[in-house]
Amino acid sequence: MRFTGKVAVITAFANGIGRATADIMAREGATVVGVDNHQGRLDEAVTALRGAGGTAHGRLCDALDAGQVEATVASVDRQFGGVHILVNAVGGSTIIANSGTGVDELTFAEWQRLIAFNLDGTFLFTHAVVPIMKRQRHGKIVNFAADA
């Protein structure tokens, strides 16, 4: 139960590495606040974590929208009194039509979309959470990277 008493915000919560991380952290005592951009998948993931005995809450948010990210993090801080762990799991190559395209076949616009998708959400959530962690005088940030 290494995460008992900790509030963990996990982006890309409903699928993949975000979901796997949420499962582990909830099982080990964290209050998981899952962030995703799809309400149906978000609700399913929250229900599954709760059904397995975990504590989970969902926040619908576009991780690439600065205003939504700031509002989401502020609401978590208000509701739970802080954020102890941030897991940035947004990323991948599914943002472009042919996710297997090599760099020599990408257009510059596709390249920019990939970079934004893989880095902007990480920056925005980190930017919003760091002041809270400084106020608390502790916190952990985990950034996952994709092959993209």
Image (cartoon, helix red, strand yellow):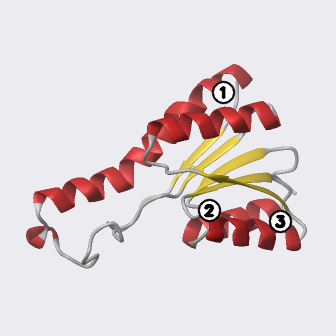
Label 1 to label 2, Cα distance in Å? 21 Å
In the displayed structure, would residue 3 be above or below residue 76?
A: below
Q: Nearer the viewer, mark 1 or mark 3?
A: 1
The residue where tag 3 is placed is: 27
Ranked by sequence position, the earlier of labels 3 and 2 is 2
Label 1 to label 3, Cα distance in Å? 25 Å
Q: Is residue 132 left or right of residue 52?
A: left
Amino acid type, mark 3: Arg
Q: Quadrant of residue 7?
A: top right
Confirm or deny contact between disc 1 and disc 3 (CB under 8 A). no
How many other residues sit within 10 Å of disc 3, few (<14), some (14-19) or many (≥20)?
Answer: many
Looking at the rendered structure, the number of numbered marks drawn on it comes to 3
Confirm or deny contact between disc 3 and disc 2 (CB under 8 A). no
The residue at 63%/54% (across/down) is: 10
In the displayed structure, would residue 118 be above or below residue 125?
A: below
Q: Quadrant of residue 120?
A: top left
Label 3 to label 2, Cα distance in Å? 15 Å
Amino acid type, mark 1: Ile
The residue at 71%/48% (across/down) is: 8
Q: Is residue 31 left or right of residue 86?
A: right
Mark number, residue 13: 2
Mark number, residue 10: none
Under circle 3, the secondary element is helix
Q: Nearer the viewer, mark 3 or mark 2?
A: 2
How many other residues sit within 10 Å of disc 2, few (<14), some (14-19) or many (≥20)?
Answer: many
The residue where tag 1 is placed is: 132
On the image, the x and y values in percent for residue 117 come to: 36, 55
The residue at 83%/60% (across/down) is: 28
Front position in the image: 71 or 108 = 71
On the image, the x and y values in percent for residue 45 come to: 71, 69
